[in-house]
Image: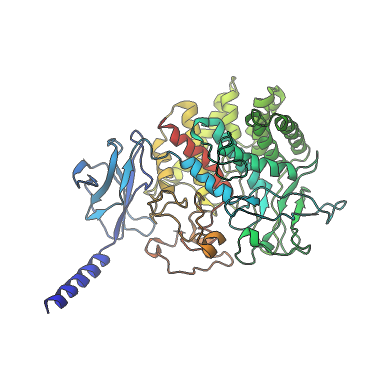
């Protein structure tokens, strides 16, 4: 009898405690650097009047910090109470948790080394995304690519374009995203060379080759870009199309037919609308793609010179030729849809040409490139997504304009302050949008919102480096905390990081879904407006939503392989984060 009463008591206690879980404290699960802003967020379904919070040491449960530095946001995003808990003045290294209102946060670390190795960790995903030889699978894929389309003289003829990276969890390949990924990784190395290690060879297999792994990865992309730009005035923009989306399979098991055996179509860039079935893009020129070729080639010519001197000479010449092609054919070269209406709807090209001109100036010291860069930069002062409530898919891409940064560093006349103001004004627009929510998140929740977060983090860090102006440090911290779990769902947005944290376990990936292979290092798309999610074609949740109580009619995220809009890792988003995480690691050097 006593045993039955005890079991009943324990069950009642369990269900009672379960029913009382209506408040949560979100923290950066990776951890906090001692001398940077440190904020947690409390969200609650009930009305709370919060006066103070405690920090306790995990091992001893001893109170080590008490604070009333609390900012209330009232009712936001389906929570009746929302608070920012600021503990920036607490700098002691250790492992802690926050406690208040009978709510306890996850454990978190304060230490100088919390970001160590994180930039290199992202490269795990990049290597896994390799096309041609894939070091994760120790096998090759898409070795028959491909046959040319949209070039009347070469239509259906074979061209060797094997290599590069798959774009996301499908196997399409785009110069648009790949060239940007190359540049972002090269830029990360240029800014923070001492962070990156050498544990893999050029093919992505374990073993040192005396070249930093991030340069090996960028070189893998460069080799493919050269194939996609085989001759002067001849550029290709895309391999395959959404006919690819016919079921999950590993890339080395891909048997999708485009009408020529295992060859896939290679889209010649015409600068005019393309789309072989129902839907077409709205291309108007070549400059957006040509500019991306040029900037990637130009920076690679500098950074690969010590390792590949002959290639370096070729790359500089290719950069110059691609840049001139962009000037000759201004306009956007969008990716091509096929059966579905989705494609990268890029509407700007001046940012690409500004970056290309600026990078060419740095390499050649030819002032004509500097002057061109200033002209292009003045024509697009702020990337239009900044401060906007929404945008089309990849409408304003890349999401950060690194040309502004290069020009600000190099200009010595009155234009310097002008370009610095462009960078600051873009930041202010996003910061102002984030002031009304407890997470201080001001990016629009469009498809791939995490890519926008990575872009903003880059712009914020570069602005601080340029000026020493610390006024945006809290907003920068809020965005990086968002990626590592300080968000309504309490999950990191990078697969496998931190290893002991909550991170996507069911991403939209054949690697994980079919074989339970981790896609470590991949930055997932991130939350989207419910209004976008509810209208997308082919989305189905295959498991009960573990985050159901945190969803609302405004913004959603699902850790479910069926949600390709929020839970699919992206190659370019992952590459774009290498700069910021390497910059954070530099704090501990």
Which residue ends up furthest to the front in the rendered image? Answer: 207
How does the figure colour the protein chain or chains? rainbow
Which residue ends up furthest to the right in the rendered image? Answer: 153
Q: Residue at x 25, y 55 (%)?
A: 103
Q: Nearer the viewer, residue 445 or 237?
A: 237
Percent position of residue 503, x then y: 43, 54
Answer with left or right where residue 246 lies relative to residue 584: right
Q: Image height check: is 230 above or below 542?
A: above
Q: Image height check: is 519 above or below 66?
A: below
Please count the marks in the image: 0
Quadrant of the snapshot with the C terminus:
top left
Percent position of residue 269, x then y: 76, 48
Answer with left or right where residue 515 lies relative to residue 287: left
Q: Image height check: is 215 above or below 11?
A: above
Q: Residue at x 68, y 29 (%)?
A: 360
- The answer to whether residue 286 is visible is no
Quadrant of the snapshot with the N terminus:
bottom left
Which residue ends up furthest to the top in the rendered image? Answer: 413
Percent position of residue 519, x then y: 51, 54
Answer with left or right where residue 39 lies relative to residue 191: left
Q: Residue at x 76, y 61 (%)?
A: 276
Specify the quadrant of the image occupied by residue 538.
bottom right
Which residue ends up furthest to the left in the rendered image? Answer: 2
Q: Nearer the viewer, residue 510 or 486?
A: 510
Percent position of residue 193, x then y: 53, 31
Specify the quadrant of the image occupied by residue 358.
top right
């Amino acid at each position: 009898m006593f045993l039955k009463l005890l079991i009943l008591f324990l069950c009642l206690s369990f269900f009672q405690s379960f029913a009382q879980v209506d408040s949560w404290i979100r923290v950066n699960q990776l951890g906090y650097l001692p001398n940077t802003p440190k904020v947690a967020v409390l969200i609650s379904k009930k009305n709370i009047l919060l006066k103070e919070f405690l920090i306790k040491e995990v091992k001893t449960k001893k109170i080590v910090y008490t604070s009333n530095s609390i900012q209330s946001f009232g009712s936001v995003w389906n929570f009746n109470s929302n608070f920012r808990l600021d503990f920036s003045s607490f700098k002691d290294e250790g492992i802690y948790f926050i406690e208040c209102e009978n709510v306890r946060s996850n454990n978190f670390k304060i230490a100088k080394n919390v970001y160590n190795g994180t930039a290199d960790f992202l490269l795990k995903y990049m290597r896994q995304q390799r096309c041609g030889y894939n070091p994760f699978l120790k096998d090759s894929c898409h070795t028959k690519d491909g046959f040319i389309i949209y070039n009347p003289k070469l239509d259906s003829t074979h061209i060797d374009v094997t290599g590069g990276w798959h774009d996301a969890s499908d196997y399409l390949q785009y110069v648009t995203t790949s060239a940007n990924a190359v540049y972002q990784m090269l830029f990360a190395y240029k800014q923070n060379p001492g962070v990156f290690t050498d544990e893999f060879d050029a093919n992505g297999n374990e073993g040192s080759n005396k070249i930093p792994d991030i340069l090996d990865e960028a070189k893998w992309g460069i080799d493919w870009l050269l194939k996609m730009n085989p001759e002067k005035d001849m550029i290709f923009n895309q391999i395959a199309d959404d006919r690819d989306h016919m079921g999950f399979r590993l890339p080395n098991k891909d048997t999708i037919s485009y009408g020529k055996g295992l060859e896939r179509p290679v889209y010649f860039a015409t600068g005019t609308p393309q789309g072989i079935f129902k839907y077409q893009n709205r291309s108007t020129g070549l400059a957006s793609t040509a500019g991306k070729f040029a900037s990637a080639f130009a920076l690679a010519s500098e950074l690969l010179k010590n390792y590949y001197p002959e290639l370096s000479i070729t790359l500089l010449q290719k950069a110059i030729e691609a840049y001139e092609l962009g000037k000759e054919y201004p306009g956007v070269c969008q990716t091509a849809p096929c059966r579905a209406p989705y494609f990268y709807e890029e509407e700007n090209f001046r940012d690409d040409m500004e970056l290309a001109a600026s990078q060419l100036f740095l390499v050649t010291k030819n002032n004509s490139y500097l002057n061109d860069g200033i002209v292009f930069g003045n024509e697009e002062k702020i990337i239009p997504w900044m401060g906007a409530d929404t945008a089309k898919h990849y409408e304003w891409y890349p999401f950060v304009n690194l040309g502004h940064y290069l020009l600000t560093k190099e200009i010595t006349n009155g234009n310097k302050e002008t370009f610095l103001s462009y960078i600051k004004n873009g930041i202010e627009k996003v910061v102002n949008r984030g002031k009304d929510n407890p997470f201080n998140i001001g990016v629009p929740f469009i498809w791939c919102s995490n890519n926008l977060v990575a872009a903003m983090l880059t712009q914020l860090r570069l602005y601080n480096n340029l000026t020493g102006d610390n006024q945006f440090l809290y907003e920068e911290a809020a965005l990086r905390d968002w990626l590592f779990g300080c968000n309504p769902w309490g999950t990191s947005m990078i697969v496998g990081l931190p290893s002991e944290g909550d991170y996507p376990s069911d991403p939209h990936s054949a690697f994980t879904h079919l074989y339970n292979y981790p896609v470590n290092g991949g930055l997932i798309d991130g939350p989207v407006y419910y209004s976008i999610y509810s209208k997308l074609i082919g989305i189905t949740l295959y498991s009960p939503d573990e985050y159901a109580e945190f969803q609302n009619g405004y913004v959603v995220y699902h850790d479910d392989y069926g949600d390709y809009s929020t839970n699919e890792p992206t190659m370019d988003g992952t590459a774009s984060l290498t700069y910021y995480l390497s910059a954070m690691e530099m704090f501990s050097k």
